């Protein structure tokens, strides 16, 4: 009897050992590729499938989105639309029209008070488009704000028109998230399927495993240093962060970040960062990206009421660090502080 | 102890050793490493657990960059030919997921660690 038990134990241990060994042998090494576009870094880490080819294709898709949406690149749809401001409607691709519609849909959540693709004349005033930073006068801001609003846009399924000749649109606040949407759509169709893909596009993330993984650990960056303050767990998702530490300048000891609060025309100061996690439905990458700005420019009270509205539209959870450095979460997500690791 | 008992004991010991070795191979953590890439290609890796300070001279797309690992676990860019100097003003990198980026030079320093429990950092 003792012998039989010993034999069974031995078999189990040998089996477990072999299984561990072969699991290790069979797990493919991830392939990491780094690219530069949209004034930031695109890092793709693919495990399994035809990883190198997938990475190249994802880069090509991001480049296409850049060529379509860029505020600067001649020939982009944004440049064409802006060049015709105050004149006739411009015909655009169905994809571009759909992206503008998604942007405007986010604006309507809170009547354009916290996110507006037509705020770019104000950003220019502050020097964020040229990196020639300055603090504009209150009058300059109020004069410019008068026409820096999405109600200047006339949209149809195939055309865009800007009413005021001085108004401009800039999709910088939504284009990276949209690029992740386009990538996600491709990843669903690629064969053989990769085991997992992590796309980091300037800090905006796409976490893809074909629905296999439910415990992605998403680090939340410390807004006032390097490293993370903790992490949240999620299934496959888009993750977008708006933070005042990404692009900013300082004058007289005051920090002016690149995210303009459309209701005031001044850089947002209510929060240090807002991270929005959205599920993998079409356009939720773009919407999450825009919602990052919405929550970044909102008070705690507004954040709670807005969350009710966006939760039904695919927002899984939000992590906010306010101006005082206090953290709060919205939605059914658990935040694990870095000290508890 | 019978002969067959001894054989069983040896089998169990060997199997246990196999499990432990496999586990170690799978989970080994080779310290924290800073990987320096220019235009997507790795140009240097620095072991941040080393106590020796190190200065790296790297050629970016625009021109030379000076990167210093302080021997206390941090790495930063001290000089760059770029106009905006964002990389020079970035907080030194030390934890997995940290980055120092110079877009004009197409240079990225990333902190990597195999045993890292975080998949990606939202920033």
Image (cartoon, coloured by chain):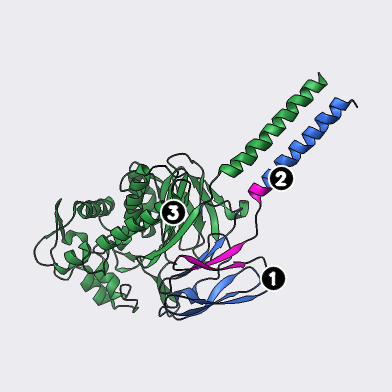
Chain colours: A green, B blue
Q: Alpha-carbon neighbours of circle 1 within 10 Å: few (<14), some, or many (≥20)?
A: few
Q: Is residue B76 visible?
A: yes
Which circle, 1 or 3, is nearer the viewer? 3
The chain that hosts pointer 3 is: A
Give the image location of residue A54, x and y in percent: 40, 51
Which circle, 3 or 2, is nearer the viewer? 3
Within the image, what quadrant is residue B47 found in? bottom right
Residue at image mark 3: A52
Q: Is disc 3 in the same subunit as disc 2?
A: no
Give the image location of residue B74, x and y in percent: 60, 69
Q: What residue is drawn where x is 66% and y is 65%?
A: B49
Give the image location of residue B62, x and y in percent: 42, 78
Residue at image mark 2: B21
Of marks 2 and 1, which one's residue comes earlier in the chain?
Answer: 2
Give the image location of residue A92, x and y in percent: 16, 57
Q: Is disc 2 in the same subunit as disc 1?
A: yes
The chain that hosts pointer 2 is: B
> Could you say which disc has been placed on residue B51 in the image?
1
Q: What residue is drawn where x is 59% and y is 57%?
A: B113
Within the image, what quadrant is residue A209 found in? top left
In the image, residue A95 sits, relative to residue B90, either above or below, namely above
Label 2: which secondary element: helix
């Amino acid at each position: 009897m003792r012998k039989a038990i010993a034999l069974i134990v031995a078999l189990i241990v040998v089996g477990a050992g072999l299984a561990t060994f072969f699991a290790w042998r069979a797990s493919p090494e991830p392939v990491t590729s780094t690219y530069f576009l949209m004034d930031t870094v695109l890092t793709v880490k693919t495990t399994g499938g035809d990883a190198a080819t997938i990475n190249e294709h994802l880069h090509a898709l991001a480049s296409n989105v850049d060529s379509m949406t860029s505020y600067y690149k001649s020939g982009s749809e944004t440049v064409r639309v802006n060049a015709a401001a105050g004149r006739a409607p411009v015909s655009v691709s169905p994809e571009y029209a759909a992206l503008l519609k998604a942007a405007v849909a986010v604006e309507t959540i809170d009547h354009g008070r916290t996110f507006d693709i037509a705020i770019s004349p104000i950003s220019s005033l502050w020097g964020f488009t040229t990196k020639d930073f300055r603090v504009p006068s209150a009058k300059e801001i109020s004069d410019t704000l008068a026409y820096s609003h999405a109600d200047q846009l006339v949209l149809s399924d195939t055309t865009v028109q800007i009413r005021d000749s001085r108004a401009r649109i800039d999709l910088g606040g939504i284009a990276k998230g949209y690029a992740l949407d386009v990538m996600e759509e491709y990843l669903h169709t690629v064969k053989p399927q990769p085991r997992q893909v992590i796309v980091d596009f300037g800090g905006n993330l796409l976490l893809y495993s074909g629905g296999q993984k439910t415990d992605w650990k998403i680090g939340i960056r410390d807004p006032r240093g390097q490293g993370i303050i903790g992490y949240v767990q999620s299934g496959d998702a888009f993750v977008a962060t708006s933070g005042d530490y990404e692009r900013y300048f300082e004058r007289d000891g005051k920090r002016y970040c690149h995210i303009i609060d459309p209701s005031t025309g001044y850089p947002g100061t209510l929060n240090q960062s807002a991270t929005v996690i959205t599920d993998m439905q079409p356009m939720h990458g773009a919407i999450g990206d825009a919602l990052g700005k919405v929550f970044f420019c909102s008070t705690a009270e507004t954040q709670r009421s807005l969350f009710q509205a966006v939760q039904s539209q695919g927002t899984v959870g939000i992590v906010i660090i306010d101006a005082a450095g206090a953290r709060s979460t919205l939605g059914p997500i658990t935040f694990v502080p870095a000290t508890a690791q | 102890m019978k002969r067959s008992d001894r054989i069983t004991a040896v089998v169990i010991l060997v199997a246990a050793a196999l499990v432990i070795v496999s586990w170690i191979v799978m989970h080994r953590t080779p310290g924290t490493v800073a990987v320096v890439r220019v235009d997507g290609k790795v140009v240097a890796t620095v072991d941040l657990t080393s106590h020796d300070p190190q200065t790296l001279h790297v050629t970016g797309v625009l021109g030379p960059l000076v990167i210093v690992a302080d021997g206390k676990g941090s790495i930063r860019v001290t000089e760059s030919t770029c106009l905006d100097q964002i990389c020079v003003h970035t907080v030194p990198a030390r934890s997995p997921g940290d980055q120092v980026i110079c877009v004009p030079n197409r240079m990225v320093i990333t902190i990597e660690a195999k045993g890292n429990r975080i998949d990606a950092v939202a920033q």
